[in-house]
Amino acid sequence: MTESSPRYAIGDLADLAGVSRRTIRYYVQESLLPPPYGVGRGNHYGPEHLRRILQVKSWQEAGRSLDEIRRALGNPAATLPTHALPQPEPPLHRTAWRRFELAPGVELHVSHDIRLPAPGKLHDLAAWCRLHFPSSSTKEHDDAND
């Protein structure tokens, strides 16, 4: 660690890594994380501690046991398969849609970037849907009269 590297108190490291202070202490105890620099109240952690915690977390999320992770960390030549590591999710593509109920149980969804037909055409489509997709109460009434 160089003089210009950031120094983290255990609480700051825990917040950055998204774990508890207890988890950090446990990782040190289990040799998954090197001990902090310094002693007593002056101890601190560096960027390499943060990288290691995030690496351990990603392997755990990929289903690796702590024993497997410990072995991989103890042997620099050993690596866990990266195909098992979670891949970042692509950002969600958000779009706006317009929803039209054409008949009971029948809807038309139109993307915001599609130009709507004239209102009369939509009314004609709704009438066609009501004719060809009768509601269950209408169908039951028709079946009773047969």
Image: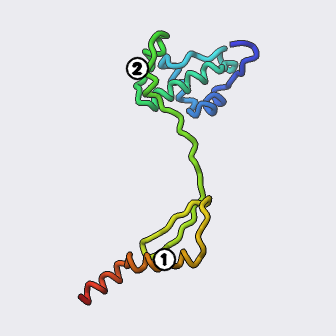
Q: Secondary structure at mark 2?
A: helix
| Lateral position of residue 77 relative to residue 143, left or right | right
Where residue 56 appears, x then y in whole percent? Answer: 50, 25
Q: Quadrant of the C terminus?
A: bottom left
Amino acid type indicated by mark 1: Ala
Colour scheme in use: rainbow
Residue plotted at (51% across, 22% down): 27
Q: Which mark is residue 49?
A: none
Q: Which residue is mark 2?
A: 68
> Badge 2, how many Cα within 10 Å: few under 14, some, many 20+?
some
Amino acid type indicated by mark 2: Glu
| Lateral position of residue 131 relative to residue 31, left or right | left
Where residue 88 appears, x then y in whole percent? Answer: 53, 35
Mark found first going from the N terminus, 2 or 1: 2
Examine the rendering and report whether any part of residue 59 can be seen: yes
Residue plotted at (47% across, 69% down): 107
Residue plotted at (53% across, 24% down): 55
Q: Which mark is residue 126?
A: 1
- Asked where in the image residue 134 lies, by quadrant, the reply is bottom left
> Badge 1, how many Cα within 10 Å: few under 14, some, many 20+?
many
Residue plotted at (59% across, 52% down): 94
